[in-house]
Image (cartoon, coloured by chain):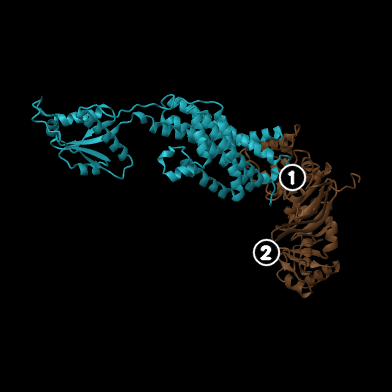
Amino acid sequence: MTKDSEPAIDVEHLTKRYDDLLAVDDVSFTVRLGELFAFVGPNGAGKTTTVEIIDTIRTPTSGTVRLLGMDVTKRKRDILPRIGVLPQGFTSFDRITVTETIQYYSRLFSCRNTDIEGLIELVNLEDKSKELFQNLSGGLKQRLGIAVALVNDPEVVFLDEPTTGLDPRARREVWEVMVDLKKKGKTVFLTTHYMEEAELLADTVAIISKGQVVAMGSPEELIQGNAKCLVLTLKSADERALEIVRAVGFEPVQDDHKNITVNVEHPSDVRKILNALTDAEASFLTLDLRKPSLEAVFLELTGEALRQGSAETV
Amino acid sequence: MSPDVIRANLVVSLKSFYREKSAVFFTIAFPIILILVFGTIFMNQDNVSLDLHVQDLDQTTSSAQLLKTLELDGRFKIATVDPAVSATQYARDNKLNLVLVIPMGYQKALLQRLGLVGGVPSAAFRNSNASVTVTYIYDASSSSVSPKMQTLQSALGAVNQGMSGEPPFIRSADISILARKFRFIEFFVPGIIAMSVMTSSLSGAVNMNAELRQKGVIRKLSTTPITHGDWVLSNILYQVILAVISATAILLVSYAVFNVSLRIDVWLPTFIVLEVFAFAGIGMILTRVAKEAESAMAAANAIMYPMMFLSGSFFPLEMMPGFLQKIARILPLYYGNEGLRSAMVLADNMAALRCSAIIGVFATVVFVVGIMTTTWEEGK
């Protein structure tokens, strides 16, 4: 098998059971070398359990997981120096500084040439380098965790909910880090419950719900393949607009800001709605027509999965 | 085993230690405070004189001479009670645990017993049955009244013996098993060292296994090349270092303040290492049973505190009832205390060896069980 064809991660029929709870239910997928793979789903879907099995924190109940061609249950010692892991809710020793934390983990990996200042700069913690871990905010701890995950210059990086708790600016900085990692040829395995994050960054997205992968593909494939509608938004619409849209056969939804959202299947439906509003002289500030988001795809997919009677897992 | 990894862990542990003031206090300052307090309290135990209040109802030269006799050998410090007051009420009002009342007629009875008339012996006047009864007014609830009454009884017995004019039949001679006379503080220091090692090792093991796991630190560490063995060994070394620092501080203060004289040899580090393994092993087992950090720490305290008091760290086992003494002899800290005392005070290598063998076997068993029952992996 050539390097190009060998997957970075190969998961086959992975199952994890805790007593009566089936946390991961027969999950299979492959992650190519050098891609950014996003594992998305709501809290409790099984994302963290799956990623912790792949990055060797947990062991599977059944199934096989191969990471860089090695079985994670048998070759853990060979795998660990080649991966970096940011666990969910990263914590470290409270009374050592940012710099000391990175130094410590680099020593665990026997890395003598770790560019500690470079890592601190990468995650924008220069002015906090002498701060004790316990004094950092949640977001800063997360950023330090990313730096720690990179001390050994890993080939595969696991980031479990890396932007949870970060402000928008910090989130974008982390996104830039992830894009940069991908450009360097690293494989990034991202778990997130932010659909827009996966949509923006990932080459491949796997949607997990109740322990099962319900869909997998590039964001565009998932959106085109599963979301059947366009989304029409009328901003600051007239009070009568809601009834008018309903009268022409659609189901609008209005929010607190008087914005009306309607799912339409064809562009001709948009014309029909606009004509009805014009005839009734009902006004609105602006009009927006978009393709559905990954979140809409998720809602569509998990709703269908439940109605189709898939096995009750929790 | 990776020396770099172990060294990295030691550095982090020691930095975390000295940056946490409460940890430094409880590890170093607390045992020193115990040494200073107990050492001061029991500093003059051998030369202690007992307070004795005496109501002399006779008010004669003879009764005054009796008081002087009691004071002379240094066992009593006499305070007089006004003959006009009720001795019982006086004892109650002043919270005294013992008042000696010398009755009126003491001198008259004494002269009759000695057969003295106007200072001149007279056989006709001598009455060998003449006697006086002194009264002890005492507080039965006081724990120190019993030894005081015994000491007084002994002193009065000596007076009676002297008056009989006959030499005593049974005499006594003291031969100490110790090379020299030791003070209470010299018996106390080894117990404090053993206790300090226990508290540090047991708490450290709970923190290492339960608290860091609960916080998620162990989860991150399990994704690095550090092995469970590296982790345990580095924490054992850390506990040994802390124990040496603590023992050194205790000994320095004891030498500086109380001028103790203790033998420091290979047994001290031996018992320190054995105790660290023993109590770290107990800590690991506890965290398997009580997985939450708070409940594991509570369980550790429930073991530590009774053991401290029952093992002879603070007071001799002989003060306890028989059944508690039997319990003490199955506690590992008892052998730590006895072993260190044998080595540092009594210079008894055989006893130290026996105690070290017992702790060694115990430490091996609990440490192995602790290692086997703790796991590096989540969700097991």
Observer-side mark, 2 or 1, equals 1
**Type of residue at label 1?**
Val
Q: Which chain's colour is cyan?
A: B
Same chain? Circles 2 and 1: yes
Tag 2 and tag 1, C-beta contact below 8 Å:
no
* Residue B204 visible: no
> Could you tell which of marks 2 and 1 lies nearer the N-terminus?
1
**B21 left or right, relative to B217:** left
Q: Report how far apart the C-alphas of labels 2 and 1 lie in the structure.
A: 41 Å
Q: Is residue A285 above or below residue B323?
A: below
Q: Position of residue A28 (x, y in %)?
A: 82, 56
Q: Residues within 10 Å of mark 1 (few under 14, many from 20)?
A: many
Numbered label attached to residue B308: none
Q: Nearer the viewer, residue A134 or B157?
A: B157
Residue A284 at x, y = what percent?
Answer: 75, 65
Q: Viewed as shown, does residue B47 lie left or right of A169?
A: left
- Name the residue carrying label 2: A256
Q: Is residue A100 left or right of residue A4?
A: left
